[in-house]
Image (spheres, rainbow, N blue to C red):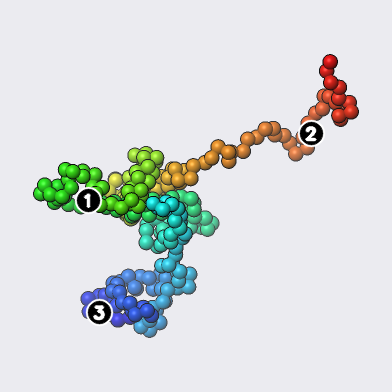
């Protein structure tokens, strides 16, 4: 670790890679005991050693069928919310809700959908595909087109009430506080809206099958016993066929 003159710290890994981070960030991480400082060496605290490499296996649909991929959950605001636990140790998000959000993000990335920033110079100049290809689909692979279709179906399924917060957090990787500022929402409301949106999204990806529902035919107390009618045959020898 080398401290530069502009308040930046050059951190060199054991593999030889080097990154520059602010000295204030390093001091904050050390103060929070998320990193350990030993002389000019830095190391992640044992409980955070695998946080940067935390991945989950996820199955997504590709042009060739289902494929299992690794998703780094430390990159997204959704991953940070997934790792958060309350005092009892319970997670705020269920595994189904988290997987649904990461599945949407994976499809969004494969669909090559990016937010348009500034002026569309191709359209303004009359060049490119603005007239012949208004949807911008020319040049997309079959995999990207299939992913775009899945994203559109998912957004339609959750409805306009939840679509915005899903796109902002899962796809644009916006923080919850930023979403609240942009949408003029009350503090800490984005987390509740996101959980409701992820719940609806998980039902879209994994709909409940009618056959999974349990039908209660009869219920009673623990000592309940069915009552036999006096004229009911007790065994086959007592049964008589009607004339």
Q: Position of residue 208 (x, y in %)?
A: 52, 41
Counting residues from the start of the chain, the first of labels 1 and 2 encountered is 1
* Quarter where residue 102 is shown: bottom left
Observer-nearest residue: 74 or 149? Answer: 149
Query: Which marked residue is nearer to the observer: mark 1 or mark 2?
Result: 1
Residue depicted at x 38% and y 54%:
106
Q: Which mark is residue 72?
A: none
Work out which residue is located at the far left of the displayed protein and give it: 125
Tell me whether the residue at label 1 lies in contact with that at label 3, contact meaning CB atoms closer than 8 angstroms: no
Work out which residue is located at the far bottom of the displayed protein and give it: 39
Counting residues from the start of the chain, the first of labels 1 and 3 encountered is 3
Local SS, label 1: loop
Query: Which marked residue is nearer to the observer: mark 1 or mark 3?
Result: 1
Location of the C terminus (image quadrant): top right
Local SS, label 3: loop
Q: Which mark is residue 4?
A: 3
Work out which residue is located at the far right of the displayed protein and give it: 237
Residue depicted at x 16% and y 43%:
131
Residue depicted at x 38% and y 70%:
29
Decide if residue 192 is in sight here.
no
152 above or below 218? below
Q: Which residue is mark 1?
A: 116
Local SS, label 2: loop
Q: Position of residue 218 (x, y in %)?
A: 69, 32
- State the CA–CA distance, disc 1 to disc 2: 69 Å
Observer-nearest residue: 209 or 164? Answer: 209
Observer-nearest residue: 175 or 150? Answer: 150
Q: Position of residue 26 (x, y in %)?
A: 34, 73
133 above or below 75? above
């Amino acid at each position: 670790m080398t401290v530069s003159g502009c308040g930046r710290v050059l951190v060199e890994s054991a593999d030889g890679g080097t990154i520059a981070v602010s000295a204030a960030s390093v001091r904050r991480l050390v103060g929070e005991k998320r990193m350990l400082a030993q002389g000019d060496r830095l190391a992640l605290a044992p409980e955070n050693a695998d946080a940067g490499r935390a991945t989950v296996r996820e199955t997504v649909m590709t042009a060739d069928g289902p494929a299992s991929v690794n998703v780094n959950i430390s990159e997204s605001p959704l991953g940070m919310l997934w790792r958060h636990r309350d005092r009892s140790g319970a997670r705020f998000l269920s595994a189904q809700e988290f997987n649904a959000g990461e599945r949407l993000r994976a499809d969004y990335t494969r669909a090559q959908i990016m937010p348009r920033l500034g002026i569309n110079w191709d359209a303004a100049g009359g060049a490119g595909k603005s007239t012949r290809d208004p949807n911008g689909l020319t040049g997309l692979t079959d995999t990207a087109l299939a992913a775009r279709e899945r994203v559109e179906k998912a957004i339609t399924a959750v409805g306009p009430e939840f679509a915005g917060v899903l796109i902002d957090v899962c796809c644009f990787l916006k923080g919850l506080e930023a979403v609240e500022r942009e949408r003029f929402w009350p503090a800490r409301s984005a987390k509740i809206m996101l959980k409701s949106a992820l719940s609806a999204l998980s039902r879209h990806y994994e709909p409940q099958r009618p056959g999974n529902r349990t039908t209660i035919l009869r219920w009673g107390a623990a000592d309940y016993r069915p009552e036999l009618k006096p004229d009911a045959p007790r065994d086959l020898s007592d049964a008589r066929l009607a004339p």
